[in-house]
Image (spheres, rainbow, N blue to C red):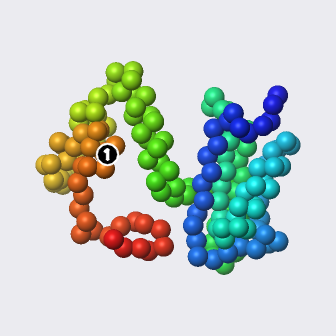
Amino acid sequence: MNRTPVPYFLAMLFLLCNSVADAEDRPISGKKVPGYEPIDKVVTEFMDTTGYQAGTVAISKNGRQYYSRGFGWLDESKSKPIPPDALMRIATVTNSITAAMIKSRIRSRQLTLTTKAFDFIGIKTPEGKTVDPRISKITIGQLLEHKAGGIWRYPTTRCFGESR
């Protein structure tokens, strides 16, 4: 079996933090996989170069996971190594993944750009709650093009505590 990661779907997720983990004390969690040592090396070198504190990498193909490791610390006090399955913010990387999935559904005629997004998802308003009625008019196409509008008076969830 060819262990070269090029044909595999490679998902590299990095948690951007202010503190830097030294290579000497950075833990690597998850099962070491023979033949994938170059991935460990590239990730740790990347972290050294960029100063990222933590990251996770998973490689899978056709629903089978071949590699999953965590690099660095889960906490600033450096007491807990990050597990390979840690949930991490991946920011705008999800945009291209979501767009590809939606475009695939459009090609297979399961969706159109004018499909009402919230009707399609089937989200119901919780009992006793109200929602802005304009939400029912938002289309898949508007979401893909970031043209659905937004409510900017609420705080964001950006990394590093940034505000708009």
Question: What amino acid is labelled 1 in the image?
Answer: Glu
Q: Can residue 145 be seen in this view?
A: yes
Q: Position of residue 139 (x, y in %)?
A: 24, 39
Foreground pick, 134 / 149:
149
| Residue 87 percent coordinates (x, y) | 56, 55
Relative to 134, residue 51 above or below:
below
- Tell which of 86 and 95 is nearer to you: 95
Q: Up-down: is 6 above or below 109? A: below
Regarding residue 119, the answer to whether it shows in the image is: no
- Taking the spot 81% from the left edge, 31% from the top edge, the residue there is 2
Quadrant for residue 19, please give it. bottom right
Q: Residue furthest right?
A: 34
Tell me the residue at 43%/41% (across/down).
98
Q: Report the quarter where the N terminus lies.
A: top right
| 10 Å crowding of disc 1: few (<14), some (14-19), many (20+) | few
Instruction: Residue 91: give x, y in percent of width and height.
Output: 47, 57
Q: Where residue 82 sits: x, y (%)?
A: 67, 62
Q: How many marks?
A: 1
**Which residue is under mark 1?**
145
Residue beneath the point at 44% across and 74% down: 161
Q: In which quarter of the image is the C terminus?
A: bottom left
